[in-house]
């Protein structure tokens, strides 16, 4: 494992006379020579070569200011997406070292900034797991709208992309602190769910109907 300074890494940009084709993400340097069609001169992602532009992997901002290793303003879920890219490079390319700077110290030790990004990752993974649990518990309804007949929401064993062995009944789900609602399917066999104060029946729809016609979404 080699330690690179920023100016050393910039010599690995794949241009003629350069030392190779490397890039860095969160301070981990990879040899991306076998992806030269992407990262080499003329490639669509040449701007990643010879530097650490971690932020741009999730923002898609490939301008000079966007191509930075500073990810301190990213949301926890963006940080999860950034680590997905890191995992991609670990899987597909050869690691060659660490970049001294924001994420690794002079002797290659993780910095405080790296610890903070890792904490954001942990937070993002927690939020993602909670969202997944929530979407399994309250899968979204199917919905359709027609000018002639108005709207309809209904539940099925795969609505919301959640494959399950129950159909459920449509309810408006209000998120706490918001006046907006969305249609979710609730297991009618579970009386505690039907009493949930964040859930409301659709006006004019029988409480155990699997499909409801509605005036507006
Ligand atoms: C945040 C925005 C984006 C980022 C950071 C990004 C990044 C990348 C990177 C790093 C690669 C090379 C992967 C490798 O080493 O094999 C790649 C490949 C590719 N990207 Fe993107 N990309 C973005 C958006 C897009 C969009 C919007 C499109 C299409 C409209 C696109 C189409 C492609 C294609 C076609 C390839 C080549 C796949 C292959 O030949 O294996 N990318 N992208």
Image (cartoon, grey):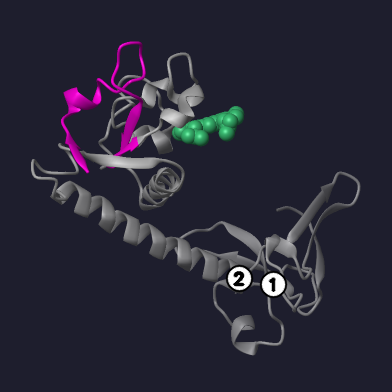
Magenta stretch: includes residue 18: yes
User: Which callout, 2 or 1, points at the residue further toward the start of the chain?
Assistant: 2
- The residue tagged 2 is 136
Which residue is at the far right?
Answer: 148
Q: Is residue 151 left or right of residue 188?
A: right
Q: Quadrant of residue 153?
A: bottom right
Residue 27 visible here: no
The quadrant of the rendering that contains the N terminus is top left
Decide: is 67 above or below 184.
above
The structure residue drawn at horizontal position 33% and vertical position 20%, both measured from the top left corner, is: 13
- Please say if the residues under marks 2 and 1 sit with CB atoms less than 8 Å apart: no
Decide: is 45 above or below 54.
above
Look at the image and give the residue range highlighted in magenta.
1-30
- The residue tagged 1 is 201
Q: What element carries label 1?
A: loop
Q: Quadrant of residue 142?
A: bottom right
Residue 66 visible here: yes
Queried on whether the Cβ of the residue with tag 2 lies below 8 angstroms from ligand 1, the answer reads: no
| CA neighbours of label 1 inside 10 A, class few (<14), some (14 to 19), many (20+) | some
Q: What element carries label 2?
A: helix
Residue 114 placement (x, y as % from top left) = 21, 49
Q: Nearer the viewer, mark 2 or mark 1?
A: 2
The structure residue drawn at horizontal position 42% and vertical position 21%, both measured from the top left corner, is: 46
In the depicted view, which residue is nearer to us: 138 or 149? 138
Magenta stretch: includes residue 75: no
Q: Is residue 106 left or right of residue 211?
A: left
Q: Is residue 157 left or right of residue 92?
A: right
Residue 119 placement (x, y as % from top left) = 26, 58
Residue 124 placement (x, y as % from top left) = 38, 57
In the depicted view, which residue is nearer to us: 11 or 143? 11
Queried on whether the Cβ of the residue with tag 1 lies below 8 angstroms from ligand 1, the answer reads: no
């Amino acid at each position: 494992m080699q330690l690179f300074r920023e100016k050393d890494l910039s010599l690995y940009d794949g241009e003629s006379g350069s030392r190779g084709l490397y890039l860095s993400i969160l301070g981990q340097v990879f040899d991306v020579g076998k992806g030269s069609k992407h990262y080499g001169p003329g490639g669509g992602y040449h701007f990643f070569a010879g530097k650490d532009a971690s932020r741009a992997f999730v923002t898609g901002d490939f301008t000079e200011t966007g191509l930075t290793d500073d990810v301190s303003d990213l949301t926890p879920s963006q940080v999860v997406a950034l680590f997905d890219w890191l995992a991609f490079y670990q899987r597909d390319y050869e690691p060659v070292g660490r970049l001294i700077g924001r994420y690794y110290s002079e002797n290659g030790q993780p910095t405080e900034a790296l610890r903070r990004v890792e904490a954001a990752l942990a937070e993002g993974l927690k939020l993602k797991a909670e969202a997944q649990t929530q979407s399994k518990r309250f899968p979204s309804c199917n919905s359709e709208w027609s000018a002639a007949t108005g709207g309809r929401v209904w539940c099925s064993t795969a609505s919301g992309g959640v494959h399950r062995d129950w159909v459920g009944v449509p309810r408006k789900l209000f998120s706490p602190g918001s006046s907006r609602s969305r249609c979710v399917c609730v297991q009618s066999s579970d009386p505690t769910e039907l009493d949930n104060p964040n859930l409301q029946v659709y006006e004019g729809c029988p409480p155990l109907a699997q499909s409801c016609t509605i005036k507006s979404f």
